[in-house]
Image: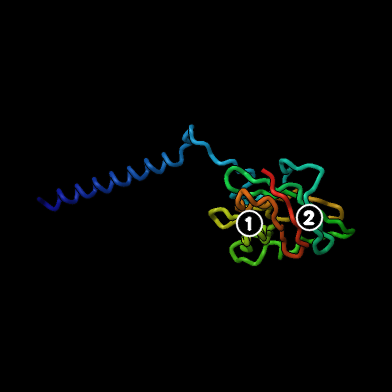
């Protein structure tokens, strides 16, 4: 066998491998049509973070009200277990005082990966005291927290809708303690 023949065979094999990889990659990114994707009610965007928006399933009733620093008030309006294995906590963050308030940076928590992504509610946790486990805010593949990000300063009386997404505790766990740095702890009931 000549070197020329061996080189051509290697090039052909490399081209075949690359083509196969590209075909499999494109097929993996396709819509799939029949596949059912998990029902995720909230996720972080690739842009500069999620913008506060109206949350689904919020009602006038709240599960808990947590008082925080600088006259901040967090009303937890729902904690819903999703079919994808998540618990999404929705609420409203309100400036209950008479002055403008800058959202404290400690609400993002103290993990470098979350802090790097700007202001958020990434420091929130759910505590299952019966199961003796603490659940932290989930992150996407780029390390961004699955929670409201880019929190603005709030004018007196202003309120914004917020969300946080956590791994789901076992189905038998219906009550957890919700904690956010600087705020009082509250027990909330998980629905769904």
Which residue is under mark 1?
137
Q: CA distance from mark 2 to mark 1?
A: 17 Å
Q: Residue furthest top?
A: 33
Front residue of this view, candidates 46 and 106 = 106
Q: Earlier in the sequence, mark 2 or mark 1?
A: 2
Q: Residue drawn 60% across and 56% down? A: 144
Which image quarter: residue 187? bottom right
Pointer 2 with pointer 1, Cβ within 8 A: no
Q: Is residue 10 visible?
A: yes
Q: Residue drawn 46% across and 41% down? A: 29
Which residue is under mark 2?
74
Q: Is residue 8 left or right of residue 128?
A: left
Q: Is residue 29 left or right of residue 13?
A: right
| Percent of width and height locating residue 122 | 66, 59
How is this picture coloured? rainbow
Front residue of this view, candidates 80 and 100 = 80
The image quadrant where one finds the C terminus is top right
Q: Is residue 92 visible?
A: no
| Percent of width and height locating residue 125 | 67, 59
Front residue of this view, candidates 137 and 126 = 126
Q: Residue drawn 11% across and 51% down? A: 2
């Amino acid at each position: 066998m000549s070197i020329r023949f061996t080189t051509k065979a290697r090039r052909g094999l490399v081209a075949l491998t690359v083509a196969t990889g590209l075909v499999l990659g494109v097929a993996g990114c396709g819509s799939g049509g029949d596949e059912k994707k998990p029902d995720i009610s909230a996720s972080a965007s690739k842009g500069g973070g999620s913008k506060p928006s109206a949350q689904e399933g919020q009602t006038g009733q709240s599960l808990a009200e947590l008082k925080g620093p600088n006259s901040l008030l967090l009303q937890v309006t729902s904690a819903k277990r999703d079919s994808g294995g998540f618990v999404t906590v929705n609420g409203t963050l309100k400036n209950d005082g008479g002055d403008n308030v800058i959202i404290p940076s400690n609400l993002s928590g103290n993990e470098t990966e979350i802090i790097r992504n700007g202001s958020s509610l990434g420091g929130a946790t759910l505590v299952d005291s019966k199961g003796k486990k603490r659940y932290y805010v989930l992150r996407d593949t780029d390390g961004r927290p699955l929670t409201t990000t880019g929190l603005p300063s709030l004018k007196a009386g202003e309120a914004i809708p917020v969300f946080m997404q956590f791994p789901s505790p076992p189905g038998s766990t219906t009550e957890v303690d919700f904690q956010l740095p600087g705020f009082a702890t509250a027990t909330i009931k998980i629905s769904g």
